[in-house]
Image (cartoon, rainbow, N blue to C red):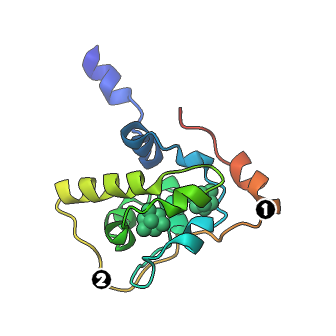
Amino acid sequence: MLVALEAGAKERTMAQKVLAATGQNLYRCLQCAKCGGTCSRLDDADYTPRQLVDLILNDQAGAVYRSRTVRLCAGCESCQVTCPSGLNLKKVFSYVVEEAGAAGIRADLGPVDRRFVGAAFCPKSRSKWTAERSDPR
Ligand code: SF4
Ligand code: SF4
């Protein structure tokens, strides 16, 4: 019975794993890009913080775990101060770095594949963004 339940159990999404580990519900992200505007570590980054949230919500774990941005994060929490949803990306990126380290995944220093990264939204489009996504809890 237990085996059958486990076999039928739905695999958790990356956003659900992040929520369980860090308490940060990335489904509350409005894709406004304010976090990138305040981040001082983007000179050598590959993805912006907003793009990383988008990748996590789209279950692009490989790109997230190999990202340079998560390793460059200084943990200053400026992005949380400016985030309209109060998301703490420092916690999210620390979790990603820990998971990548445990899996032996190193940063990708090559060209960045942005096929799965959507555009930032203007305020008028935010309702569409949030309506398309359900809360993982
Ligand atoms: S906590 Fe990290 S991602 Fe956020 S602004 Fe600071 S350096 Fe950038
Ligand atoms: S500032 Fe907050 S809501 Fe806006 S894109 Fe960044 S994480 Fe999402």
Residue matched to label 1: 123
Q: Please, what is the three-letter code of the amino acid marked with disc 1?
A: Pro
Give the class, few, some or many, for how many residues have Cα within 10 Å of label 2's Cα (few <14, many ≥20): few
Residue 26: x and y in percent read 54, 49
Q: Is residue 104 left or right of residue 32?
A: left
Specify the quadrant that holds the N terminus: top left
Q: Residue at the location (29% across, 83% down)?
A: 109
Q: Residue at the location (32% across, 51% down)?
A: 95
Q: Along the line of sight, which residue is nearer the eye, 31 or 1?
A: 31
Task: Look at the numbered disc 1 and give the secondary structure of its residue.
Answer: helix
Q: Along the line of sight, which residue is nearer the eye, 110 or 78?
A: 78
Q: Please, what is the three-letter code of the amino acid marked with disc 2?
A: Leu
Residue matched to label 2: 109
Q: Is residue 47 left or right of residue 8?
A: right
Q: Is residue 28 left or right of residue 47?
A: right
Residue 99: x and y in percent read 26, 53
